[in-house]
Amino acid sequence: MSSIPENSTPVAGAGAAKARPAAAPKLNIIGLEKTEYKGGNSTLCNGCGHDSISARIINAAWDLGLEQSQVVKFSGIGCSSKTPAYFLGQSHGFNGVHGRMPSVATGALMANRSLHAVGVSGDGDTASIGIGQFKHMVRRNVNMVYIVENNGVYGLTKGQFSATADRGQVLKYAGTNELMPLDICIEALAANATFVARSFAGDAKQLEALLKAAMRHRGLAVLDIISPCVTFNNHEESTKSYAFGKENEIPIHELNFIPSYEEITIDEYDDETEVRLHDGSWLVLKKLGEDYDPTDKMLAYKTLENARTQQKLLTGIFYIEPEKPSLVDLLNIVDTPLVQLPVEQLRPTRASLHEIMATL
Amino acid sequence: MSSIPENSTPVAGAGAAKARPAAAPKLNIIGLEKTEYKGGNSTLCNGCGHDSISARIINAAWDLGLEQSQVVKFSGIGCSSKTPAYFLGQSHGFNGVHGRMPSVATGALMANRSLHAVGVSGDGDTASIGIGQFKHMVRRNVNMVYIVENNGVYGLTKGQFSATADRGQVLKYAGTNELMPLDICIEALAANATFVARSFAGDAKQLEALLKAAMRHRGLAVLDIISPCVTFNNHEESTKSYAFGKENEIPIHELNFIPSYEEITIDEYDDETEVRLHDGSWLVLKKLGEDYDPTDKMLAYKTLENARTQQKLLTGIFYIEPEKPSLVDLLNIVDTPLVQLPVEQLRPTRASLHEIMATL
Amino acid sequence: MSVAVQTSPQVAERPRVVNDFNINVATVNGSGSQTSNSLLIRSLFKMGIPVTSKNLFPSNIQGLPTWYNIRLSSEGFLARREAVEVMICMNGATVAEDMASVAEGGIIIYDDALPIAAHRKDVNYYAVPVKELVKAANLPYNLQKYVGNMIYVGVAAHLLEIEMDELRAALVWNFGGKTKPIEMNWNMLLTAFNWAQANIVNEQPYRCARMTGFNEGKVLIDGNTAAGLGALYNGVSFVGWYPITPSSSLADAINTYAPQLRKDPETGHLTLAVVQAEDELAAAGMILGAGWAGARSMTATSGPGISLMAEFIGLGYFAEIPAVFWDIQRIGPSTGLPTRTGQVDILSTYYLSHGDTRHVILFPATPKEAFEMAGNAFDLAERLQTPIFVLSDLDLGMNLWISEEFEYPDAPMDRGKVLSAEDLKARGGKWGRYLDEDGDGIGYRTLPGTRHPMAAYFTRGTGHTPYATYSERPEDWENNLLRLRRKFDTARDLVPAPVVNEVAGARIGIISVGSNDGAIEEARSRLRNAGIETSYLRVRALPINQTVRAFTEKYDTIYVVENNLDGQLHNILVNEMPVHAAKMISTSKCDGMPLSARWITEQINQ
Amino acid sequence: MSVAVQTSPQVAERPRVVNDFNINVATVNGSGSQTSNSLLIRSLFKMGIPVTSKNLFPSNIQGLPTWYNIRLSSEGFLARREAVEVMICMNGATVAEDMASVAEGGIIIYDDALPIAAHRKDVNYYAVPVKELVKAANLPYNLQKYVGNMIYVGVAAHLLEIEMDELRAALVWNFGGKTKPIEMNWNMLLTAFNWAQANIVNEQPYRCARMTGFNEGKVLIDGNTAAGLGALYNGVSFVGWYPITPSSSLADAINTYAPQLRKDPETGHLTLAVVQAEDELAAAGMILGAGWAGARSMTATSGPGISLMAEFIGLGYFAEIPAVFWDIQRIGPSTGLPTRTGQVDILSTYYLSHGDTRHVILFPATPKEAFEMAGNAFDLAERLQTPIFVLSDLDLGMNLWISEEFEYPDAPMDRGKVLSAEDLKARGGKWGRYLDEDGDGIGYRTLPGTRHPMAAYFTRGTGHTPYATYSERPEDWENNLLRLRRKFDTARDLVPAPVVNEVAGARIGIISVGSNDGAIEEARSRLRNAGIETSYLRVRALPINQTVRAFTEKYDTIYVVENNLDGQLHNILVNEMPVHAAKMISTSKCDGMPLSARWITEQINQ
Ligand SMILES: Cc1ncc(C[n+]2csc(CCOP(=O)(O)OP(=O)(O)O)c2C)c(N)n1
Ligand SMILES: Cc1ncc(C[n+]2csc(CCOP(=O)(O)OP(=O)(O)O)c2C)c(N)n1
Ligand code: SF4
Ligand code: SF4
Ligand SMILES: [Mg+2]
Ligand SMILES: [Mg+2]
């Protein structure tokens, strides 16, 4: 989801957009109320982290003024993968099979390059059964926001370990996990990802900024979001619990997203780094602790490996490479979405067939 | 393949073993000629890198005095995966389905923990279709030598790109590869591998040392071996060609393997590092260029990422963690191989059934 | 507290209906009603009453409508019955339709906080002040929701006359003797019971009463637990699995009982390995690897998992590797409804994988059979050297059934044709992995690790000779397939034989399979009452054998009754017996519910 | 150079055998013999002679025995024929059996460096001094092996009287006009030809002679290329695939011809996307995604790939997504023999995926049909909104066939029931994705990106209502499946109709499928000569329709002829027509080779 859908340019120019907060607080830049971005009623457990994330997606989409008809939602199978039914109700959604969302999304997005895509998966869906398709989608840098709602457990099948479960994690039925976790962010990095971030379902502000940046990134934006499963993995010792997240989240920077339609002057603060996204939006990173340069891949590995070993919940954007081409850019295909080609472009001429026949 | 098969202790003690080179050059420590370690005739192309690797495996196994009946061979599908038929003809072999060798090996090795295993796969078999099972096998640290015969191409299906193909690699039929490669070694590291090495089919000495160390490692030893496909990807520009390998291989250290049955005194040379393997063997790394500490994971990431970006062929052992438990150690199962348990241990008592029935 | 008296006009005292009605409990899932429902069914069972339960739960974790249906049948019919006489309404989301669903003359026990749409005149209502009772019980806040479910148990105990001692015993059993939850729940239950006694004049007709003659020597258990126990008692040594409803509880049962049954007393270590795989492809690969190495290996999955295993199972078939695949069927195609039952994978499993493949399938009908077939499956897998499927379903697997006690497996395990180092020595090392020495299509195998220089062979999914060497020769290919067919024919008389119940003079035969059993028996009884005699053959395995042929031959019409849309068993039978094809009538239905005797009766008695 | 004269005693001049014999070329694969063989077949074709080739190659890259069998048939029979009259032996590893395999009276052309085990008296030998001729040609060292194969072409040209002009033309065609390889090879060929002319007295009877009446208006092409072209001419816009023999050349053909046929003239960009997936699961997922988004999407694979796709295809079926799956069948089970043919995936594809599924399958018999069915498949996929399978096989897909020229697809593409934003507006936004408005079982769909607030719907593999909302209700489930069955019935008359050839007075009917066609026609001719008339129906698609029923009804006996072990089509026909089950005889064989007319004749004329 690299750029603003064509028809969602500010209704009254940049100036008007700037005045928005004062003028009409309930309408976004394409004139819609936030409720329009809702989906069906959630059937998840009360308090499930996944529901918070849905709310953040709704906010981010509304804020960016996404045209829902130009958005597609993909998911696999799991509690997390159900959520696309609960946001952006006016967008087409595709709830696929377990662990294989990437391939479905890849096909759809190559067939129609103008679509903007949000994919939602779970840690089981992505890191256990789905790690293969995940890696290859990352490698292809397909244009999509790839959200992993990571709770370290299989929610929908009632509490088994996923491959992101912490070593030592204890579950009621499954016992103690003895294996080191796969780390979604490290996996993404290893497969040459161009946007790698982690957040926490309980950190609304950061998450929204990240979602917006991800929606404006060209290529695959991987968002590993710690999202507590209140039913099966919310005891305090779990690094995927609310309690742990609220106590222990360490943002590596403060994040601000400034959409392309807002005129800004980037001030030269010492403690801020700006990353210009492909569509002209900006991601502003404000220093919190150590310096963090999100274009330094080795720093990303190091930061993430240390966090994994020490079971620390670091959040923020670990790595970004805004200019790398996405798969559709590499395929040498026409600009018109393939699904919109007229028959003349789909069927070669009669003469051409005669020519070929003559050569055989 | 963590330790010497129980019955392959030196026939005449360590002293005799030391005297071996002088006494009977054609018999190994369990009294066998090298030809006994051969398999069927290869049906690969003349000059295929995979055949060189088979020869190295034969040498290493003979040198270590492996008891073939206690060794099992696994593979997927591909030219590379055919090779287990061409070495260790007296070992059971299992040529499975494409990309799914890891699961078959895992099941067999849990069922019989006393077996020593060598798995052979290709880059397509492991990095394309098989990356999922590969990652999970690494994560589980199953006791096996996992060899990837990496030629950057699908040999058996005649020359398509695999996921390890270099960016910019050109193939006769498939054109130019635009995507960054997956790097087997980085993938292994990310999944918490305990033994990560790369070698080159043309570097007999290094490869044999690595093979022996891998066979003595506890857990999964990943060997990414560049193995030229002389038929489809051997032009000079390919980093997976003989010409490139011979010209450009950069060993990060000189490697020596010293088996546990050889008495050695480790001298304190400045330019040598020793790693003690689980069974008491030693891997001696002699400094060549920069210092390299193979227990430093971050250094491994850095070295490998740089090599990937710069398309350099670095070889050697990048990372080793000799003391981590392997899957079978974590499963809380009896020491006797499960397949050898007597019926009394497989069938609970009659009384126990009555007890259970009474509770229902 | 408010006094709940009957609000609908009721014609005086009606004749008692004892042990012959349906209770339906409507709750919200994840609310703890599972415990309450299990108390109900267990205490009724312990009172000697034939009962069955059907748990109708949604495919989510918490907050959606759930129904627990308990049928009492003094005659011992254990199939699903549609009508509901006693409705317990605890869920506002469905209360209107729940109340509407009650049979004429039935009763409704309901939370008085629920909105009631319409008052029917033909049923009795019993409002229960749930909120006030919970309050009175003074429960910790976070447990109110869970423990509150005891209220309907208490009220039902009064109205239906369920024995309080049995409820108490069930509670103790349920919490494994843990005092705190037992007392808290009991307190709640008792409070509700007392309230009901004090406030409800029990004029309604439905009653439970202790009886004998049916439940003696029986247990109450679900099919998945039975299967898990069966595996443990029959030497399972490797389980590779991936969670999927409704099969997960089979692996759970193995994990639960393993420490008790399969622990080495000296070391405390287990004599089996259970590995949760990363997906079903890996689970299949693992158990094939383990089976190849010589373990009794198995997995449990459901439709989507079976589909994912298709390629690997072709390998298992063609490389001839023993392994057992349990498919606890749920309805599909695709993800379908994970919490609804069906016998929908018969065809796709029988022909699973590309190329010419057909597989041996076992079909348990009861928990006892699930227990036994767990053993049969291993014996067959090792004898036939091939993947064996056991097709259970959600109804059998996850619902509680009254089952005969399981018999201890006395017969020695059949480990099949395995050559040891000594055997090889005796043969002078001569053997062929795929050589049909015995004419039964089954070769000999060696296990990796066998200490003999001729022991090794190379396993592959590609063409091979009798000596396991690679071959592309047409004759080798064809001969190998013909041998596999011979092996399949060998299987016909090794698999569990069909169960046949023939009635003299019957012209109609019924063939069915698996968990339909109870419904078929009940339908036959109904048909008999209507003057129609039927004979019945229950297929317990594929491929079929002579018994099925003989049965089919004998009757004018054969109804093939099954719980799917396409008549999948019918399809296979028609193919096995094309000469009888014309008289075999496919009688199938698939809506996610177990078949009912009524529906079957209607199909046959048209 | 040595002079090769006939070494075996030969009975004077024998009657000429013109255009009616088999040539078999035995070489080593990866040796370049492919080029030589293609010259042979192409020049014979251009001489107007009906020819067929069967390339029998091993599943490796280089160094193993390969045979290239060319049949000349003046009557125009294009099926495999077993006997070999002209054997060309260039491979020492198989020379003994190759020489032994020649028919009585046949000839053997061989590399004189090869060891000859036994001299037969009933055949003529022609030794060729390959090494010396190569030397004489003065070739660059690294090309000697490849170019050396031209020698047998030159010798055969002399002995069999293949026109040198046509060989030259074929060579030019083969190297796309590139002078250097053309001249080098031609030089070699000519040297050999001249040598043969000078040294071999051509007394043997086999001759090729230009003829007319058959090849006019025909082309020489393999089925995979035809299918690729068909896809390109019928609007394919997304291909997701994974390499697997024998299907890879289908994707290759698309990649080869796309720049010529599907390039936007202005930008030079393509109007289709081809993505090599990481495996077949991903390929299936990709084309379902693309089909869902509105593209004409397809994949090409073989048995193992189809098995891996099973879960995804269930989703495609149940969520009703158009996509086309080509299965170029090779023999299985399991990895089987990647380079051997069979019609072995009919059953597993028809019932692919768990749950109640049945799929539409098309069966091309000729390259022309492969071209056409590529279009039919897209039309059907979009009309029926479901995965469509096209089952070709290695024989059709990878061998060269004489085919009628392809006709330009004039009919407009059927893009199915798709609602645009305007349509939605006209309807006031009212529609139901799975609502059967038209009674044909097919709902309407919208494509993502449709700019209308009511356009969106949610696609899922779980239970759903006609309005695409989630549902667990039994009625919804059952109704949905019943609608899918209705849709399947709609398919019966939309798919390509069977080809029927009925003979008055025939009592025997033959039903067959796909690439057996030639063998069947030839067998029918043989049977006719033996006084047995047969009628013939070639099934071109599943599910079957009334035509197949009527045909089956009409004949006393129906032979269902197919190239697999289990009689897979027979199985399906028996199920579709149980009343006729008894008279349908399964006539099947599976050894990796295409069926021969002789075998079929024997089966029917027993
Ligand atoms: C092929 C297949 N295997 C198994 C399942 C059962 N299943 C459904 S969701 C799920 C795991 C979900 O875990 P996760 O992705 O972490 O999502 P969560 O529920 O925790 O949000 C599993 C195993 C399935 N639907 N399909
Ligand atoms: C499921 C499946 N898909 C595809 C194939 C076809 N296939 C055989 S080998 C191979 C690729 C082999 O490449 P690699 O692993 O790199 O081995 P190499 O031949 O290069 O040694 C493929 C795609 C197959 N056998 N099975
Ligand atoms: S089970 Fe866990 S993940 Fe699923 S809805 Fe409930 S809280 Fe969320
Ligand atoms: S094709 Fe390549 S990989 Fe295969 S055998 Fe030949 S050289 Fe080796
Ligand atoms: Mg999860
Ligand atoms: Mg390769």
Image (cartoon, coloured by chain):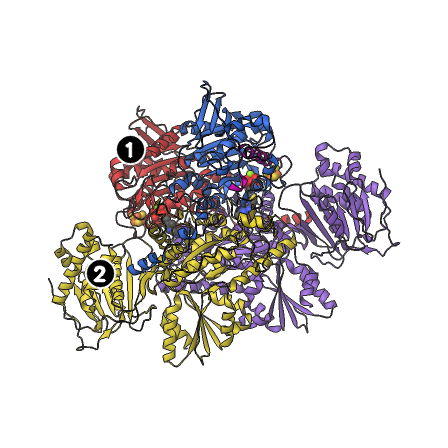
Chain colours: A red, B blue, C yellow, D purple
Camera-side residue of C117 and C52:
C52
Q: Residues within 10 Å of mark 2 (few under 14, many from 20)?
A: some
Q: Residue furthest right?
A: D12
Label 2 – label 1 distance at C-alpha: 51 Å
Q: Is residue B69 magenta?
A: yes
| Residue A268 shown in magenta | no
On the rendered image, what quadrant is the N terminus of chain C found in?
bottom left
Query: Which residue is tagged 2?
Result: C169
Chain that bears disc 1? A
Residue at 32%, 69% (x, y): give it: C82
Is residue C234 at least partly visible in the picture? yes
Mark closer to the observer (2, 1)? 2
**Mark 1 crowd level (few <14, some 14–19, many ≥20, 10 Å Cα):** some
Q: Toward which corner of the image does residue D560 lie, by quadrant?
A: bottom right
Quadrant of the image occupied by residue D318: bottom left
Residue type marked 2: Ala
Q: Is mark 2 within 8 Å of ligand 3?
A: no
